[in-house]
Image (cartoon, helix red, strand yellow):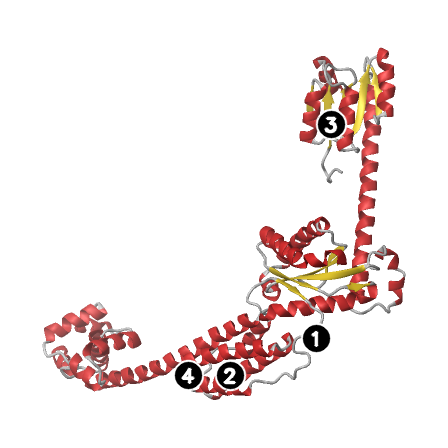
Amino acid sequence: MVAHGEKYRVILVDDEPVILRSLRVAVPWEELGLEIVGEARGGEAALELIRELSPHMVISDIRMPGMDGITLMKEVLAENANRLFIFVSGYGEFEYAREALREGAFDYLLKPIDHDELIEMIKRAKKTLEKRAENDKLLHSVQVLSMLARERMFAEFIEGNQSQSHLQHMRWLENSELTQDYFMAVIQLDHFVKLNEQWSPEERRLWLFAVRNILGEWSVAHGALTMFPFHGGEWVLLFPSALTSQKEELGSDAIRQIQLYTKLTCSVGFSQTAAGLERLSEAYQSATRALYQRFYSDRAGVFIDQPGREPGADREAKYPKHLEAVLLDSVRTLNRERLLSALDETKQYLEQQAFSKEAAERMMVELTVVMFRQYEQMNLLSEWSLEGLLQELQSLGTLSEMIGLLKTNFGRWISESRDSQIKDNVQNVIAKTQEYILSNYHKDLSMEEVAERADLSISHFCLLFKQVTGYTFLEYLTECRIEKAKYILKNSQVKVYQVAPMVGYQDPRYFTQVFKKVTGMTPTEYREAGV
């Protein structure tokens, strides 16, 4: 088949260079929508060229040294029956030409070559290629539609909609392949909800298409009855029950293939044995029940539903009030270590009780909400979002990931809250020192005096003062004194040498130097500028 806008490819074969040159020049290849992609002067060379360039049409001499044209054609058509051969033969080679037609040649032309006749023959050959392409396209469309209809039927039965009357008209698609015992595999991409948020629509389409192609080839090679996508990030495969003992091996190999070619991780759930279309829904529930085990597993893998009761189905889901109390007290006291330990105990409790995935998820959500509400009551929340946390929590696929998320977020919040309390205390201490400086800037104020007022060592005071204000003590004191001097100069007629002691400088000349360094002007220039 030729893609839109491409030309049909032609190879010329003759042991006489004159004939090759004549064929190349006399036929309007471009106008006919054809392209000469290669030439050969013998059968063996032509065979290599055909295998390399995959032409649609070969125009060849019948009689050549070594491999003749008919032998060449047999070799080529055995590999691809859709290629067309046109032979050129002499008058004495009619029997060869007739044999060539019997063996599948499109047509033959007698030497000396009538180029008009050859052109008409090539046009007919091209129409034949085009008709074949249309038929191939139609056949492909029918196959695709049949496959889609079949997948739709299976999906309807899986969802329990087999009572719909239109399905009864689609049973011919089943091919009786499900009348015998079979089992189902459901393959799910890990973290699909999160991946789906990260991917653009085009990326999503490409990734899912890639996985479908991988599973399509893999399922055929491993004896699957069918394979089709079901929900987003999920594929259903059906296998004959004869492969039941190979479930672990099949699942592991499917996971390896997907990870090898896409770097995506996934898990596989296998159902118990079923038979008949009507039990597809039951088989799907069995396979997804097996996948619930992924919730309690730390890694992707193969999970098999065994005969017996569903884990946790016969047990009342008892909410862990005792653990809730410990978690709330940890939040109240901002005890990060105790909180992390209590979350580990929560994980252990849920695993031991073997609750269903839905029950365990529900408890995790409830515990998250009550802890968050405790923060609200303590007025510690800043930009933390309960809705965002719950969305992220419910996008995770395993209990370990959920516990990890709560450890990370609540652990960080406790640390931030404790740091904030310490920071508030520091802010208050430094604010008091700033007030003291503003009240005493006109005195001979020393760093030791201010540090003592803050009840801090000089080194600790310097460190905290710089962290909170962005200034060293001396920078802050100087800034304060110069601002006061600017105010006096601007709003009074006090002489410059009198301003100096009013703002803590006993030496007027030193005051003038500092003032100019800070403002870029002398006190007199500042007053005259009227800034």
> For numbered disc 2, what is the local secondary structure?
helix
> For numbered disc 4, what is the local secondary structure?
loop
Q: Tell me the residue that label 2 is attached to.
A: 371
Residue 477 percent across, percent down from the top left: 21, 78
> For numbered disc 3, what is the local secondary structure?
strand
Q: Tell me the distance, in whole angstroms, between the alpha carbons under discs 1 and 3.
A: 67 Å
On-image quarter of the N terminus: top right
Q: Tell me the distance, in whole angstroms, between the alpha carbons under discs 4 and 3.
A: 80 Å
Which residue is painted at 29% across and 83% down in the image? 431
Which residue is painted at 73% across and 27% down in the image? 10
Q: Amino acid at mark 1?
A: Arg
Q: Residues within 10 Å of mark 4 (few under 14, many from 20)?
A: many
Which residue is painted at 31% across and 85% down in the image? 428
Residue 367 percent across, percent down from the top left: 55, 82
Q: Is residue 120 left or right of residue 288?
A: right
From the image, state whether disc 4 or disc 3 is nearer to you.
4
Count of numbered marks = 4
Q: Tell me the residue that label 3 is attached to.
A: 10
Q: Residues within 10 Å of mark 2 (few under 14, many from 20)?
A: some
**Residue 381 seen in the figure:** yes
Residue 239 percent across, percent down from the top left: 74, 57
Mark drawn on residue 243 = none
Q: Tell me the residue that label 1 is attached to.
A: 309
Q: Earlier in the sequence, mark 1 or mark 4?
A: 1
Q: Are marks 4 and 3 in contact (CB under 8 Å)?
A: no
